[in-house]
Amino acid sequence: MHGPSERLTTADGRTLAYRRLGSGPTLVCHPGGPGFSSLYLSDLGRLDEELELVLVDPRDTGRSDPAAEPHAYEIDDYVSDLEELRAHLGLERMQLLGHSHGGVAAAAYAASHAERVERLILASTLPRHGPEQEATMQAAIQERSAEPWYDDAVAALKTELEGDFADGRELMDLSQRMMPLYFARYGDRERAYVQDMDGEKLSVDALRLWEKEIFGHFDLRPLLPRLTMPTLVITGERDFITGPSCAAELAAAIPEAETVVLPRVGHMVFVEAPDAFRQAVLSFLGVGAPA
């Protein structure tokens, strides 16, 4: 399922790896975290049955090299890598999907390279994290307090936010313990999906920079009117961190935005509602049978 890794050499001499899945119109896909490789995207709800997915491993994830220094994980750094990937693939214009932090990178890329993006999909993402979003997130976490996994997930979240981990594998272990918070319902399918991440390691530098210096301060709203291409904003109704209010804020400022909110679904929309996610994306791209 994962497909062989391909790679390019960036202008500054790094390896940037990516994988292809499926066949059909090309959809370039940027994962989130930051710090996760593309493996957690899996086949994005079987989108590979209708599309060629190009799944990039961002810098310092998967088979991609780390940046030359620990601060080179700014939003604009990911934008630069996306442009190098587009040129390497020989795409005059690309269809681009970003999930979570990948949606931040994709939106920033589309704002600065609008002529290079044919269609844009912003999945489970946000333009900023202000006080309102923080309050919504904390309330959503508290709503899950009766769950048997709650105490361990919150303890892992606290440890991660304090930076109390030694390396990328410890960080992945913490992320797996936190992961139930990212679902509306943490059942057998979701548990198996999280277990599939065993053995992966995350980018410590990317996550630390994001949490310590970027997450509470970044604001894409001034850039959003530049997203003149057709754009799909899709999220889960019960996403605790990038839910309907974030989708509404994105859509309000994007000239040609279409919004889909999947009911009773959390952050990992393609895991909890693969069929609905797949149908929404294919319909937006005009691929396959009509919805």
Image (spheres, rainbow, N blue to C red):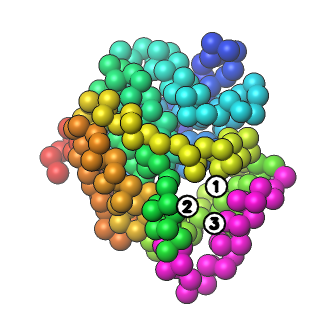
- Determine which residue is flagged by label 2: 193
Q: How many marks?
A: 3
- Decide if residue 267 is on the left or right side of residue 11: left
- Determine which residue is flagged by label 3: 178
- Which percent across, then down, holds residue 14? 69, 20
- Asked where in the image residue 148 lies, by quadrant, the reply is bottom right
Q: Amino acid at mark 1?
A: Met
N-terminal-most mark, 2 or 3: 3
Q: Which residues are magenta?
A: 140-166
- Asked where in the image residue 68 lies, by quadrant, the reply is top right
N-terminal-most mark, 3 or 1: 3
Q: Secondary structure at mark 3?
A: helix
CA gap, disc 3 to disc 1?
Answer: 13 Å
Label 1: few (<14), some or many (≥20) within 10 Å? Answer: some
- Above or below residue 145? Residue 218 is above
- Above or below residue 153? Residue 285 is above
279 in magenta:
no
Q: Of the numbered discs in the image, which one, if any, rests on residue 214?
A: none
**Residue drawn at the location 68% of the way across and 48% of the way down:** 212
- Above or below residue 4? Residue 104 is below
Q: Marks 1 and 2: CB-CB under 8 Å? A: yes
**Residue drawn at the location 39% of the way across and 33% of the way down:** 223
Q: Of the numbered discs in the image, which one, if any, rests on residue 197?
A: 1
Q: Is residue 29 visible?
A: no
156 in magenta:
yes
